[in-house]
Image (cartoon, rainbow, N blue to C red):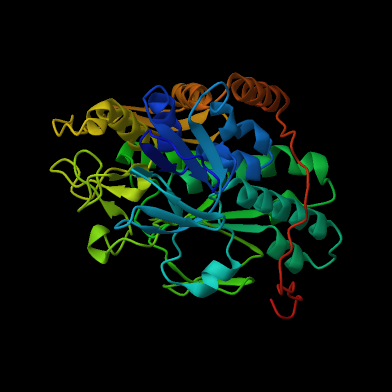
Amino acid sequence: MNVPKSNLPRVVVIGGGFAGLNLVKKLRKLPIQLVMINKHNYHAFQPLLYQISTSGIESDSIAYPLRMFIKKQQNFYFRLADVKEIDPDNKIIKSDIGDLSYDFLIINTGTKTNYFGNKEIKKHAMPMKTIPQALNLRSLILQNFERATVEADIEVQKFLLNFVIVGAGPTGVELAGAIAEFKKSVLPLDFPDLDPELMQINLLEGADRVLPPMSEHASKKSTKFLKELGVQIHTNTIVTSYDGKLATTKDGKEFATRTLIWSAGVIANRIDGFAEECSEPRTRRYYVNEFNQIKGFKDVFALGDVALMISDDYPRGHPQVAQPAIQQAKNLAKNFPKILKGNTNLKPFKYNDKGSMATIGRNKAVADIKKLQFGGFFAWFIWMFVHLMSLVGFRNRLVILISWIYNYTNYNKGSRLIVRRYSVTKRRIRTNAEL
C-alpha cells in the first residue's frame, strides 16, 4: 500500500462511516501512524440517501472527502482500497491494492443489504445502501415516468408506475412518503399527460405494524400520515419472490412492478479471516466486549453496525444506527492512550440512547426521544435540525438547507436529473395480455 515504515505504532481504521470518522478525529493527535482504508474516497451520510433517490437533493451534498482529514496532519494516510481478508495471527490486512501490517486494527465496515438468501430478489430488487445505488434508483424512477408517457397501454403504464417498497422500517417509511409527495407535487407538473391515479405506492412489512423498532405511538402516527399521502400499507406480508416483473408474497398476493425497492433488512459487512466463533452466524456481527475488542483479541476492535456487544440492557446488541457507532468511537478514542501504554484499566462502553426518528413527508414526522413521543410538525422540525447538524462540513449543511427551503417553498424537487441511465437488464415490459 506504499505506507512508509515508522517507529510509531501503526493504527489502521477500516471504514469511513460514522464510527471511523469520529475515531480519526480523536486519534490524530496521538503518537501513532494512523491509516484509514475505505472503498470510497468519501463519507456518505446514509440517512438522507432516500432524498437523493427521490430527487430532493444532489449526491455531493451528503458526501464529504475523507482526504480532507489529512490536511496539515502528519503520520495520517488514506488508501482507497477494498479489504478482502485479515490475517489476525500475523497482523496483516490483504486488499485489492496490496497488503499492510498493523499494530492495532479498528473495523467499522457497517452493513450491507440482507436478502435473506433469496438470490432472485437480490438479482432484481433495487437496494439503497450507497450513493451509487440511490442514483440508480432515481434514474429508474424517472425513466419509468418517461417510458410511461410513450406507452398507450394503460396496464403497462400501471406496471411502470407501481412502486413496491419492501420493509417498513425508517428507510422504507421515509422512502414511501417521499415517493408519495413526488406523485402529489411533481408528477402533475412534469408529466401532465400521465394520470396520477395510475401511480401506486405499496409498502410491504413482515411485522404487524410499520416502524417496528419504534413506539406504538410512532407506528400509529406514521400509518396515518402514509395513508393520507395515498400509500397502500400491507403488514404481515413477506415477499418470497421477484423476477423483475412480478413480486409474490407468502400469503399469495401479487404485485406487477418494474421497481421493487428492498429495505427489509441489513447484515454486517464482515471481513473474512477471523474464526467462526468471533462472529454471530445470523447477523455476521463480530462479538465484542465492553471495550469493543473482538472476541479473543486485545489489538483488534470493531465498532458500530459490525459490532455485537451483548449486555443485560441490550441482549441482542445495540441498534444498528448512527449513535451507537459514534459513541463507541468516542469511547475507544478515550481509551486509546491507555491501550498504547498497555494499561488494561479501560473505560467500558455505555450506550446513551438519544431516541429515534423518521420523517414521512412535508410537516409529517415521528420521534421517540427518551420517554417523550412526538408526531407531526414539531417532530418534523426536530428531525430536520438533527439531520442538518449531523452532516459533515459547513458546505454540505448550507447546500442541504437551501435545497430544503427551495423544496418546501416551491412544493417542488429540483434534482430531477437522469445523470446516468440505469439499465434494467433482461426485464421486458409485459404486454396487456401478459399482465
Q: Residue furthest bottom?
A: 433
In this view of the protein, which residue sits in the foreground, 20 or 76?
Answer: 76
- Residue 36: x percent and y percent? 48, 39
Q: Is residue 8 above or below residue 235?
A: above
The answer to which of 117 and 182 lies nearer the viewer is 117
Tell me: 278 left or right of 411: left
Using residue 248 as the reference point, say whether residue 93 is left or right of it.
left
- In this rendering, the answer to whether 42 lies above or below 397 is below
The foreground one among 11 and 152 is 11
Name the residue at 63% across, 71% down: 244
Q: Is residue 112 visible?
A: yes
Q: Is residue 32 above or below residue 113?
A: above
| Closer to us: 266 or 205 | 266
Q: What is the quadrant of the C terminus in the image? A: bottom right
For residue 326, what is the image quadrant? top left
User: Would you identify the image quadrant in which residue 408 lies?
Assistant: top right
Q: Is residue 356 left or right of residue 1?
A: left
Looking at the rendered structure, the number of numbered marks drawn on it comes to 0
Task: Return the x and y of residue 138 as percentages of the image width and height.
Answer: 69, 49
Q: Please name the residue shown 54% across and 38% down the image.
A: 78
Q: Is residue 63 left or right of residue 236?
A: right
Residue 204 visible? The answer is no
Residue 111 position within the rendered picture, expressed as x and y whole percent measured from the top left: 43, 51
Question: Residue 56 appears at what percent x and percent y?
Answer: 66, 36
Q: Could you say which quadrant of the image residue 143 lies in?
A: bottom right
